[in-house]
């Protein structure tokens, strides 16, 4: 019997009832704008920022309209401007180089290793080319953050972390997003908390925080923020920082707050699923499972394997055969960008030299979402299907 998977790779769990109730409250009172508060009232958005600052241990937190907006705001707030070079990952998704381009800056791509993390030797070699690194913890794979920070500190590079896939993750106990000067997160539907769209920026730097608040469109209402620096800091930046609207609103904040409280438990559920996939796929001939370092606390919200050094046609055979059995795999080796997947050479507004070692890894990456609506049995079935189809194509090679 040929097993078929019938689950939906893009189906999230519902918003928790507590969040639905809180959202209805906001809808009933009608004060959705974060600064629309009654005397003495604290907005859901301001409370959300306090919650997220506490969760990450950051001094300051700003909630914004998207993860991409958090990154472009972070770049502006650390002083990146038109023509500046910004180091970033060759293996990431389009909003990352897009955030750099949005401030008129120029991405300089750093390669990817077989562990799917940024190539630290390549970073070291390119460290002289920029003053800022926008580090993407792509698909939740965290590099050796101790070595990365040592390289960047020695070169005077400011690190901004893209934690779209690492909310709830950590490196040696330090939450992802807390190694660099700024951490940026996404609350978009496919990430670890879901408000449709949304994002966070965290930092311990009072000037970066104050600039980010003004940039996000606070007007002179910044004193209504509870996870922001002292008003005296705003005095130093308020006349010279433009308003580039990108605020969070109270409706989204209300549905996010209960999700943040549940995040730790959800991470455990994701990792249970991840381990079933890992166990089901380890030892498949021709297929490499990415072994996770002991220092990393990851969030298994997606799963990657490598078909290293396979002919491209064979990889697309695997993708096609798995799709026919209901298993949706994304391939980073495809010549054309498809859906959310693209690669550094798809972003043709950047002049990027070819990176042969990175191309070799990208050509082998198969990627899959793992929504929490999948059961452990679903994950075991998915692993059996991938194992069988990889096996069938590998033997025919
Ligand atoms: C989703 C994503 C972002 C941006 O998040 P949005 O909230 O969609 O703007 C940034 N980086 C990566 C790697 C992402 O996948």
Image: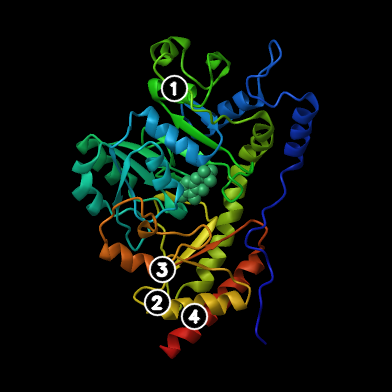
Q: Which residue is mark 3?
A: 335
* Lateral position of residue 242 relative to residue 380, left or right: left
Q: What's the CA distance linking mark 4 and mark 1?
A: 51 Å
- Mark in front: 3 vs 4: 3
- Badge 3 or badge 1: first in the primary sequence: 1
Q: Secondary structure at mark 4?
A: helix
- Badge 4 or badge 2: first in the primary sequence: 2
- Mark in front: 3 vs 2: 3
* Lateral position of residue 14 relative to residue 289, left or right: right
What residue is shown at x 41% (from left), y 73% (from top)? 307
Asked if the beta carbon under badge 3 is closer than 8 A to the nearest atom of ligand 1, the reply is no
> Image quadrant for the C terminus?
bottom left
What residue is shown at x 39% (from left), y 17% (from top)? 240
Q: Residues within 10 Å of mark 2 (few under 14, many from 20)?
A: some
- Badge 1 or badge 2: first in the primary sequence: 1
Marks 1 and 2 close (CB-CB < 8 Å): no
Q: Eyeballing the image, is 390 above or below 355? A: below
Q: What's the CA distance linking mark 4 and mark 2?
A: 9 Å
- Badge 3 or badge 4: first in the primary sequence: 4
- Badge 4 or badge 1: first in the primary sequence: 1
Q: Eyeballing the image, is 116 above or below 267? A: below
Give the x, y percent position of residue 150: 25, 40
Marks 4 and 2 close (CB-CB < 8 Å): no
Q: Which residue is mark 2?
A: 312
Is residue 187 at all visible to an observer of this figure? yes
Residue 317 has which mark? 4
Q: Residues within 10 Å of mark 1 (few under 14, many from 20)?
A: some
Q: Which residue is mark 1?
A: 242
- Mark in front: 4 vs 1: 1
């Amino acid at each position: 019997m040929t097993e078929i998977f019938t689950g939906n790779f893009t189906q999230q769990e519902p918003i928790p009832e507590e969040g639905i109730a809180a959202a209805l409250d906001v809808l009933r009172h009608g004060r959705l704008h974060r600064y629309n508060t009654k005397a003495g009232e604290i907005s859901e958005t301001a409370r959300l920022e306090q919650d997220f600052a506490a969760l990450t241990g950051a001094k300051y937190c700003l909630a914004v309209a998207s993860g991409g907006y958090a990154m472009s705001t972070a770049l502006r707030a650390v002083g990146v401007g038109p023509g500046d070079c910004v180091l970033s990952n060759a293996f990431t998704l389009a909003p990352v180089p897009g955030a750099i381009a949005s401030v008129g800056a120029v991405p300089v791509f750093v390669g990817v290793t077989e562990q799917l993390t940024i190539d630290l030797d390549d970073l070291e070699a390119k460290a002289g080319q920029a003053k800022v690194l926008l580090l993407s913890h792509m698909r939740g794979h965290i590099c050796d953050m101790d070595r990365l920070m040592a390289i960047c500190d020695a070169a005077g590079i400011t690190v901004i972390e893209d934690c779209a896939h690492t909310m709830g993750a950590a490196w040696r106990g330090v939450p992802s997003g807390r190694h660099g000067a700024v951490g940026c997160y996404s609350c978009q539907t496919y990430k670890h908390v879901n408000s449709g769209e949304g994002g966070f920026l965290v930092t311990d730097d009072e000037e970066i925080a104050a600039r980010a608040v003004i940039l996000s469109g606070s007007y002179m209402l910044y004193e209504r923020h509870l996870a922001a620096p002292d008003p005296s800091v705003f005095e130093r930046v308020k006349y010279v920082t433009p308003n580039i609207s990108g605020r969070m609103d109270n409706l989204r904040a209300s549905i996010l707050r209960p999700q943040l409280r549940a995040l730790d438990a959800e991470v455990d559920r994701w990792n249970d699923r991840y381990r079933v996939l890992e166990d089901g796929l380890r030892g498949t001939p021709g297929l490499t499972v990415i072994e996770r370092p002991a220092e990393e606390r990851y969030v298994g919200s997606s799963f990657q394997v490598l078909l290293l050094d396979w002919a491209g046609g064979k990889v697309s055979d695997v993708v096609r055969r798995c799709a026919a059995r209901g298993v949706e795999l994304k391939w980073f080796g495809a010549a054309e960008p498809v859906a959310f997947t693209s690669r550094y050479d798809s972003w043709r507004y950047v002049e990027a030299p070819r990176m042969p070692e990175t191309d070799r890894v990208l050509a082998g990456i198969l990627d899959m979402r793992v929504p929490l609506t999948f059961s452990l049995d679903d994950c075991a079935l998915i692993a059996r299907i991938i194992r069988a189809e990889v096996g069938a194509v590998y033997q025919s090679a």
